[in-house]
Image (tube, rainbow, N blue to C red):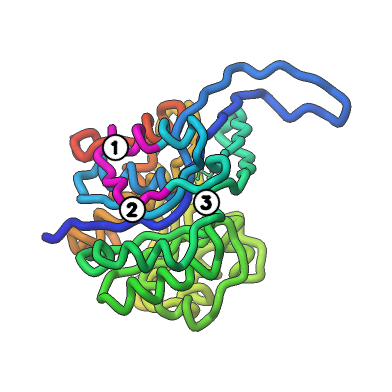
Amino acid sequence: MDRRTVVIGSINYDIIIKQDRLPKIGETISANSVSMSGGGKGANQAVQCAKLGLDTHMIGKVGNDHFGDELLNGLEKYHVHTNFIKKADTNSGLGFVNSFPDGRLLSTIEKGANYKLQIKDIQDAVSIIKEASIVVIQLEIPIKVAEYAIQLGKKHGCYIILNAAPSVPISADVLKLVDCFVVNEAEASYYAGTEIETAEQALAASDLLQNMVAHLVCITLGEKGSVLFDGKEKQYFPAEKVDVIETTGAGDSYIGGIAYSVLNNFLINEMGKFASKVSSKTVTNIGAHEAMPSLEEVIM
Ligand code: RIB
């Protein structure tokens, strides 16, 4: 099996505040704890792929601040190849996450270097894309760059996984090139144009979303599980029951599980179970990269 995976996307420095609730306007409250760590949907997905044993290369941009060096070191620590991560003449992207006791999150990003990524940066990395089996992309980079990356990956025969997060308008023609489209309930609601909160709603809306892409749709619903549909087989997967500590990066971890499943030719049934198991491990610890499981931890 050729395990080479290229992840194109965001690299953020995350500040995760655990708190019971949000303050009201004019009110000050104390947080329960704060943690600072490597994050960003792209970097999270790259770390999870690498922890599952995939030969993972990342294309992206960090800033010329001290966070940039820390983020690069963090990725290298988890064996993500960083040769195609450039430094931009600005600050690194930041993620501000409010994490509540029930596991729900509010997430705000500061674009920073991620939005300095250009089409030329993708072209400069074509040698690695040519050698990849899978390209994984999210939308915390300029949309034109993401669309170009999808087209280039497809041209070179790669399986394209698009995590359409955050939800932004995207070319319908480019979406048709996407082999696997992964969205959470908020993003699924945006792209389907209908409210999706429950498994039943996700099962119903998966037809419409699957029609927009080449093959597979995955809708993640947090503690409510996930839905997979490839145009023939449609299946609901309940989330594994675990003691939730903190959920940042759980969706990204799920995508690492999907990438591993694709490379191992898993059927939908195995794929949904495996990805759910991977993300269920991630929510049992704080932060994204550190909390993500190795392959041994998933299959033990
Ligand atoms: O998906 C979780 C990620 O979203 C966080 O790490 C944060 O940086 C934002 O990009």
User: Quick one: SS at disc 3?
Assistant: helix
Residue at 48% in and 26% down: 245
Pick whichever of labels 3 and 1 is earlier in the sequence.
1
Q: Does 269 appear above or below 205?
A: above
Question: From the Cβ of disc 2, is ligand 1 less than 8 Å away?
Answer: no
Residue at 56% in and 30% down: 15
Q: Which residue is mark 3?
A: 114
Q: Which residues are magenta?
A: 72-86
User: Quick one: SS at disc 1?
Assistant: helix
Q: Hey, what amino acid is under mark 2?
A: Phe
Q: Which residue is mark 1?
A: 76
Residue at 42% in and 52% down: 60
Question: From the Cβ of disc 3, is ligand 1 less than 8 Å away?
Answer: no
Pick whichever of labels 3 and 2 is earlier in the sequence.
2
Q: Nearer the viewer, residue 279 or 89?
A: 89
Pick whichever of labels 1 and 2 is earlier in the sequence.
1
Q: Does 199 appear above or below 217?
A: above
Q: Is residue 190 visible?
A: yes
Binning the other alpha carbons within 10 Å of mark 1 as few (below 14), some (14 to 19) or many (20 upward) gives few
